[in-house]
Image (cartoon, helix red, strand yellow):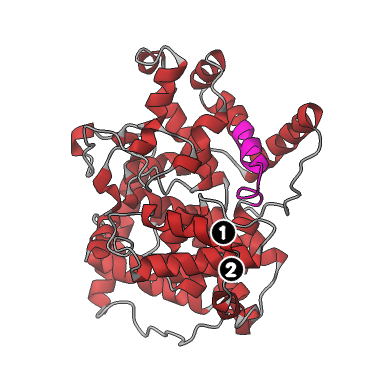
Amino acid sequence: ELLGTVCLHSAEDIPIEVLRQREAKWLDMLNSWDKWMAKKHKKVKERCQKGIPPSLRGRAWLYLTGGKVKREQNKGRFQELDNQPGDPKWVDIIERDLHRQFPFHEMFAARGGHGQQDLFRVLKAYTLYRPEEGYCQAQAPVAAVLLMHMPAEDAFWVLVQICEKYLPGYYSTGLEAIQLDGEILYALLRRVSPVAHRHLKNHKLEPILYMTEWFMCAFSRTLPWASVLRVWDMFLCEGVKILFRVGLVLLKCMLGSQEKLKSCQGLYETMQLLRAIHPQYMQERFLVHEIIELSVTERDIEKEHHAQLRSWKESHGDLHCKSPPRMHGAKAIMAAEPPSRQDLRQRPTIIVESPLASMTDEVQAEDTERSRKANKKSHKTTITPPMEEVHPYPPSTDPSPLLQHLTLQKSEESLSSAEHDTYL
């Protein structure tokens, strides 16, 4: 019931007829996934931007990431890893972290409950699958979000894809990949918001201090739940550029004008501000609009990546961890490893004869969708952040302990905003 409430919130302003129609469209796409990705990828991207229907989100994520193909090509592998005891060093650390992930969510609330058991299985299996990497604490909330939407085996393969294709090197020792991306974010900010960039530069605020948890946890410990789901829908479709856009939007909104900077004249005040992002800037509709409107492309990121790599080599020498190349989203992953039709086949295959009960309802739904599109176009650049009082998650007066201690190693829970009820 709690999870249902969460899902409903993210789709609260969508008429039920439109939601049913979207579900039918997604079922059709999933039944012919390779054709859609090859010939109509733009439409897939648009539908991810609108938000994947809650009932199909887990299956869509599995297909977008290539986790479905990976699972089919490695049948029995997860069970094999699951049956192994695991390295005691990693097992001990993972067990100590289990109760910290979404402690107010019914799935993870009980010590030793089914949610915590599955989380342990997935994280332990990853340490056996990639023993040279082992376990990183930031993987736990990522795996927990996946387990809210799919069984343990599927969550494991999606986690593998996120760690190896979307965010390679993020969870390796030394955190070199995340440091590089921090410098890329900082460089991109110069173009997106010169005021914010200058402020961070003047106060010598290193990107690693404010963006590590954002990126390593894919904003799952930062944003309200409805916004997390929408960001992940786009991130798993389009790749890491979505995380960069979210970070840039938040920095611009919090530090992008002289008026906003009046309240944070020093490094400490700026850090406090970035640890408690104003709720109106994280609100689902506003944030998604800003992400889509912000023009930061894969090419921008790759260009800056090469520049930062040169700079890194000059100051630090070669990278210690050689990560595989980053894949920018679902299309790139599928192109790199073309799947067979058999790997993509759904079991059981779901065939929908008609998306809606009657043609009349279908026409009404299309009219509703058309009017929503027209309304969106007519207000293309006029969305402003709502006033704080209308935000669905009113902030509590006491910030969570995580706001006072940014380091992941000291993390006590999976709540990084002051709104403790965000993750119910």
Residue 86, above or below 47: below
For residue 281, above or below residue 13: above
Pointers 1 and 2 in contact (C-beta within 8 Å): yes
Q: Nearer the viewer, residue 48 or 265?
A: 265
Residue 358: x and y in percent read 25, 80
Q: Is residue 149 visible?
A: no
Q: Decide if residue 3 is on the left or right side of residue 137.
A: left
Label 1: how many Cα within 10 Å (few below 14, some 14–19, many 20+): some
- Establish if 326 lies above or below 60: above
Residue span colored magenta: 168-184
- SS at circle 1: helix
Q: Secondary structure at mark 2?
A: loop
Q: Does residue 28 appear in this view?
A: yes
Task: Give, as a three-letter code, the residue at label 2.
Answer: Gly
Residue 56 picture quarter: bottom left
- Residue placed under numbered mark 1 in the picture: 90
Q: Which residue is mark 2?
A: 86
Judge from the rendering whether residue 85 lies leftward or rightward of residue 226; answer left or right. Answer: right
Can you tell which mark lies on residue 197? none
